[in-house]
Image (tube, rainbow, N blue to C red):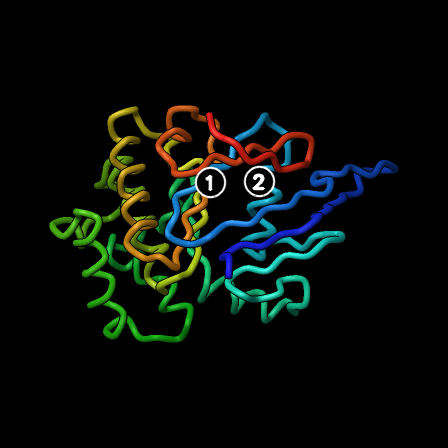
Amino acid sequence: MPVVDAVDLVREYRMGTETVRALDGASLSLDGGQFVSVVGPSGAGKSTLLHIIGALDSPTSGSIEVDGVDLTSLSDDAASEFRRHRVGFIFQFFNLVPTLSAWENVALPMLLDSRSLAKARPRAVELMERVGLGHRIDHRPSELSGGQMQRVAIARSLIMEPTIVLADEPTGNLDSHTGADVLQLLSDVAHEDVNRLVLMVTHDAAAARACDQVVTVRDGRVINGSL
């Protein structure tokens, strides 16, 4: 069973008196154990597709299953539960809480799932070590470099052991050397578990070439291919 199975996705938005179609019959099937990039021009529908896969948005029509779950049938509460347990998110601007230490930022999804800080700490520290920051667990984001903050964000995305990790321009704020390190880490995350998919939106052609598969989105449709 593919991790992502989307068929004929349409997403329309109202802008004043006009209807804008961000997705126009997009179809996509992706298996686990892969690092996949989504590329395309601005306004092509990449972010909309990512948001629907992550249950942050719903399609106007079409079908979408992620990890065997029909996302179109979920209530708001069920969608929130799905995001918390099945999806890890990584953002361009890291989205770390400045008043928390690095390991506390990693543990945050477990805290939001009503688990205690004491119970979350061992797993958070383990993941900090996994991303090469075992010596930085008590540092706050302001004391970390951009690359280190993104590694913290990657560790946080894994704390709930998700089936799918969605990364939105994860190297966009990093220099080329640090970005390459982050891409390698994301590749390792994808390949260490045959059931896990890492899906990355990027404008960087070099970053896309580091992936196992490149999916191009154009005019709201998905075109599978390679750079």
Task: Name the residue located 36 percent from the left edge and 48 percent from the top edge.
Answer: 96
The residue at the far left in this view is 135
Question: Where residue 139 appears, x then y in whole percent?
Answer: 19, 49
- Whole-number angstrom distance, CA of label 2 to CA of label 1: 8 Å
Residue 31 higher or lower than 207, as above or below: below
Mark 2 vs 1, N-terminal side = 2
Which amino acid type corresponds to the residue marked 1 in the rendered image?
A: Asp
Residue 146 higher or lower than 162, as above or below: above
Camera-side residue of 118 and 74: 74
Question: Where residue 189 appears, x then y in whole percent?
Answer: 30, 50
Task: Name the residue located 38 percent from the left edge and 36 percent from the top edge.
Answer: 211
Question: Where residue 99 appears, x then y in whole percent?
Answer: 31, 52
Task: Name the residue located 38 percent from the left edge and 63 percent from the top edge.
Answer: 109
Camera-side residue of 9 and 106: 9
The residue at the far right in this view is 17
Q: Write down the residue under mark 2.
A: 47
Which amino acid type corresponds to the residue marked 2 in the rendered image?
A: Ser
Residue 118 higher or lower than 37, as above or below: below
Task: Report whether 103 appears left or right of 39.
Answer: left
Marks 2/1 in contact by CB < 8 Å: the verdict is yes
Task: Name the residue located 69 percent from the left edge and 31 percent from the top edge.
Answer: 219
Q: Write down the residue under mark 1.
A: 168
